[in-house]
Image (cartoon, helix red, strand yellow):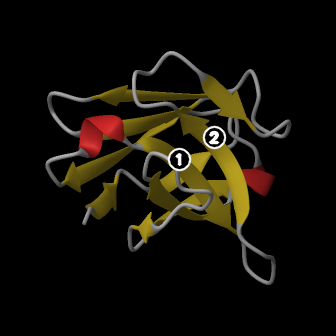
């Protein structure tokens, strides 16, 4: 079982930066793939980024590639999403999620943190 709590959301101007954090609990955190997803008003939830358990492989949605960076600290049980050069279309609720080794889907989710980009 993993519990996830996001923080760091808020209001940011277009072109600015924001760093989201996700605090995780659970003894096997270091074995999980971690991801960030987002859901904008009236839209379906979409994938943003993910990082393997070792941090060796990261994957990004095309819409954020080159602007966002996902990272993790297995000692602190934290996952981060550094958001640079934000755009109005990045406005959404951002969710942290974890996927157990061998699982297909992300099975544990946080409650989300709101990011609003003003133009």
Q: Which residue is found at the position 17% from the left and 55% from the top?
A: 25
Is residue 24 visible in this depiction of the protein?
A: yes
Above or below 73: residue 30: below
Q: Is residue 92 above or below residue 19?
A: below
Q: Is residue 17 left or right of residue 23?
A: right
The image quarter containing residue 63 is top right
Residue 94 % position (x, y): 54, 60
**Percent of width and height locating residue 39:** 67, 69
Q: Are marks 2 and 1 in contact (CB under 8 Å)?
A: yes
Residue indicated by mark 1: 35
Q: Is residue 85 visible from the viewing direction of this image?
A: no
Query: What residue lies at 45% left-to-right and 21% top-to-bottom?
Result: 55
The correct choice, above or below, for 71 with respect to 26 in the image is above
Instruction: Locate residue 21 relative to residue 67 in the image: left or right.
Output: left
- Badge 2 marks a residue whose secondary structure is strand
Q: Which mark is residue 49?
A: 2
- Disc 2 and disc 1: Cα gap in Å? 6 Å
Q: Which mark is residue 57?
A: none
Q: Which image quarter holds the N terminus?
A: bottom left
Task: Give whichever of 96, 7 is nearer the camera.
Answer: 96
**Crowding at mark 2 (Cα within 10 Å: few <14, some 14-19, many 20+):** many
Q: Secondary structure at mark 1?
A: strand
Q: Residues within 10 Å of mark 1 (few under 14, many from 20)?
A: many
Residue sticking out furthest to the bottom: 42
């Amino acid at each position: 079982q993993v519990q996830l709590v996001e923080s760091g959301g808020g209001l940011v101007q277009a072109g600015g930066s924001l760093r989201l954090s996700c605090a995780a609990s659970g003894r096997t955190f270091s074995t999980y793939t971690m991801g960030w997803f987002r859901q904008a008003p009236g839209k379906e939830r979409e994938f943003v980024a993910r990082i393997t358990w070792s941090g060796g492989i990261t994957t990004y949605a095309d819409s954020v590639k080159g602007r966002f960076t996902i990272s993790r600290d297995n000692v602190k049980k934290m996952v981060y999403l550094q958001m640079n050069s934000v755009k109005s279309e990045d406005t959404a609720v951002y969710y942290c999620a974890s996927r157990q080794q061998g699982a297909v889907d992300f099975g544990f989710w946080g409650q989300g943190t709101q990011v609003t980009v003003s133009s």
